[in-house]
Image: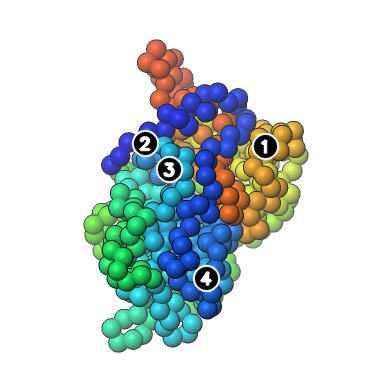
Amino acid sequence: MADADNSNLLSILEGAADGTWSRVNLNSFSDAWPDLADRPLSGGSHASPSAIISAWSSFAWDAARGDLLLFGGGHQNYAGNEVYRWSGSSQLWELASLPSQVTLLSGGLYVPVDGAINAPTSIHTYDNNEYLAVADRMITLGGASYNTGGTQQIQDPGGSLRTTGPYLFDPSKADGTKVGGTTGSAVDPAVLGGQMWQNRDVRDKFSFTTSAGSLAIGNLDGTTAAVVEEGQDVVYFTGTVGGGTDKYLFRYQITDVTDPSQDTVSVIGSWFTGPVAYGAAAMDPLSGFYVSMSDTPGQPFVVWDTDTLGGVANRSQAIALTVSGGTISDSRLAGIDWDPATDAFWVWSGGGDVWRLEAPDSGLIGDTWSLTLVTDGDLLAANARPASDDPISGGIRGKWKYASNLGAFVALDGITEGDIWLYRPDGWINPVPEPGTYALILTGLGMVGWNLMRRRRA
């Protein structure tokens, strides 16, 4: 696995102040788009890859390399399943794979010409793209597939269709001159295949037994958070069951990246009354709190305690808040992630506004949490913050991630520009410090760790 060379980005963060933004891309997302001749036709024309950012999307932050990985499109927007990479070392957008040629199956479903076992259909990814630190892969859990708006589908030898996925993308195989699937599957059949995707094809495990029988889990408007537990990649995610709208919380574990048969999925929570998980989520692995943005203005957060063993009996609840600095006008548009250095959830609500959400000192999920506006975007110059108060009409969702190799947050803004912004949180410490500062940092981390353990036991 490659080590991230992010000395350039760390230097930028060193020169910034706490609570400020820095734009760090040196070219535009559109500079990396494939030529028209290399894009599959969408409704008889070549649609714009800008939909990969605009249409209900997310990215994964590859902390091993310091790169942003972007995959999406989907439904009525864009048929291309190419992957893009923004390199933290070069600060440039580039293609990580060329798109597959697509073929039409029954029901209006388009799949790659070499079959859905080799590459995914273009989809709205919502908050469903994450990086798996142990497997060294990007995972996409699914969303709204191109043209149908349904789940990822695969055709069995008999011709019938069934749900498939999720998919893993191997960033070590990224190559913008190759198609992500097999040789011959690009729009130009002479293009070599990089075989960058692995279809876990375990969606039969993504089912839920009710009185009506076994129903498939849907990931439309899904939220996710990836963590490492006991040396294993684990993805917590919300999804609906069958045709319902209630959100359940699930735990998906990849035990062996080479053996999908060992993958496991279990239900660990369900929706109760009140706001519904929506938009984006984050996980504090120390407390076990899974916090999602909500669909209800005035009640911006939903939380589950994943350490509670109760399955469907483990109900979600709205977070009781004390708020300082203003209000989040529309929680559905915000992004959220957890910062272990500050032991807090950080929320980007659009423009330059950034909030800090802190759990109660008691460690009790039902006690009052605090939400503080840390950076007021209205006080920043236009060129010193992300450009738009509503950066993407489908919401920020998973376009705001904590980068452990930077100790800072990464945000994506602008559907053609693909502007990459770094946000330096309060108390930022360079994760690759000068040797003389190690003793002070270790002392500080020891105090942080003691406080976290105390909160965990509360």
Query: Label 4, label 1: how many angstroms apart (C-alpha)?
Result: 33 Å
What kind of element bears circle 3?
strand
Query: Label 1, label 3: how many angstroms apart (C-alpha)?
Result: 22 Å
Residue 4, label in figure = 2
Q: Residue at x 62, y 59 (%)?
A: 394
Asked if labels 4 and 2 touch by Cβ distance under 8 angstroms, the answer is no
Amino acid under label 4? His
Query: Label 1, label 2: how many angstroms apart (C-alpha)?
Result: 28 Å
Identify the residue under disc 1: 383
Amino acid under label 3? Ser
Residue 87, label in figure = 3
Q: Residues within 10 Å of mark 2 (few under 14, many from 20)?
A: some
Q: Position of residue 112 (x, y in %)?
A: 38, 73
Asked if labels 3 and 1 touch by Cβ distance under 8 angstroms, the answer is no
Amino acid under label 2? Ala
- Is 340 positioned to the left or the right of 137 in the image? right
